[in-house]
Structures are given as structure tokens and as C-alpha cells.
Image (tube, helix red, strand yellow):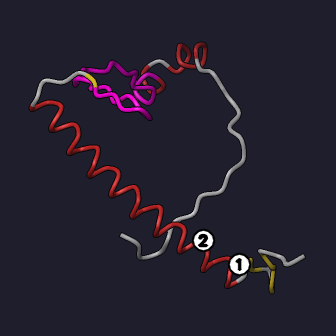
Amino acid sequence: MNELIKVENGTAVLAPETAAKLAEFERKAKEIKEAEDALRQRILEEMEANDLKSVETEDMLISYKAPYDRETLDSKKLRADHADLYDEYVKITTVKASVSIKLKGAK
């Protein structure tokens, strides 16, 4: 079995072919996301221009969501101003393990 990561002199080294594959996947994913975002924006603009609330195809339903105000809690300010109250209501949840991959020099 090929190791994806080797430790050499205390430093983790990713196998070159694995690094190349990941970099290519990340580039393609970014290109696809940018194309999707541009298409979504055009659909949004056309739905607004035509006052459409939904568009349905055989494969999907696209629904327009109007802008709205969202109420959020400033937890940093609450913690700073009322630490005891914050501690009484804070909820701790466990987040599963994952990896984050970011390309260096990618725009």
C-alpha cells in the first residue's frame, strides 16, 4: 500500500502524485463553483426581472428567496459584558474530524 503521507526528519511530506491530484481537483472545483455562482446570479436576476417566485423543470425546482433581515446574537459582546450569563447558556457540541485543503497562490 502506498503511503499518502510520509514523515521525514519530523516533517510530513505528501506524495507528489497525491498532491498533484488534490491540486487539480481543487482547481476544477473552484472553476465549477465560479461557473455555478455566475449562472445562479443570472437566474436570480431574470427571476427578479420577471417577478417569478419559482421555476420548475423535470429535474429541479428553483425558488426565489427575497432578501430579509436576520437576527443574530453577538456572542463575543455577550461574553465580554455578561460572562456569567453567557456561561449559563453556552452549548458545546463536538465537530467531527476533517481536513481542509487550500492551494497556495490560488485566487
Q: Secondary structure at mark 2?
A: helix
Magenta residue check for 13: no
Residue furthest to the right in view is 1
- Asked whether, in this view, residue 96 is left or right of residue 46, the answer is right
Residue drawn at (51%, 66%) of the image: 26
Q: Position of residue 19 (x, y in %)?
A: 63, 78
Most common SS among magenta residues: loop
Magenta segment includes 60: yes
Q: Amino acid at mark 2?
A: Leu
**Of all residues shown, which one is farthest toward the left?**
49
Give the image quarter of residue 78: top left
Asked if 39 appears above or below 95 in the picture, the reply is: below
Q: Residue at x 42, y 21 (%)?
A: 81
The amino acid pointed to by label 1 is Leu
Q: Nearer the viewer, residue 92 or 83?
A: 92
- Residue 96 higher or lower than 100, as above or below: above
Q: Nearer the viewer, residue 64 or 82?
A: 64
Circle 1 — which element? strand
Looking at the rendered image, the quarter that the C terminus falls into is bottom left
Q: Which residues are magenta?
A: 55-78
- Mark 1 or mark 2, whichever is nearer to me: 2
Quadrant where the N terminus sits is bottom right
In percent of the image, x 71 and y 78: which residue is there? 14
44 and 22: which is toward the camera: 44
Q: Which residue is mark 1?
A: 14
Residue to which mark 2 is pinned? 22
**Percent from the top left, x then y, of residue 50?**
11, 29
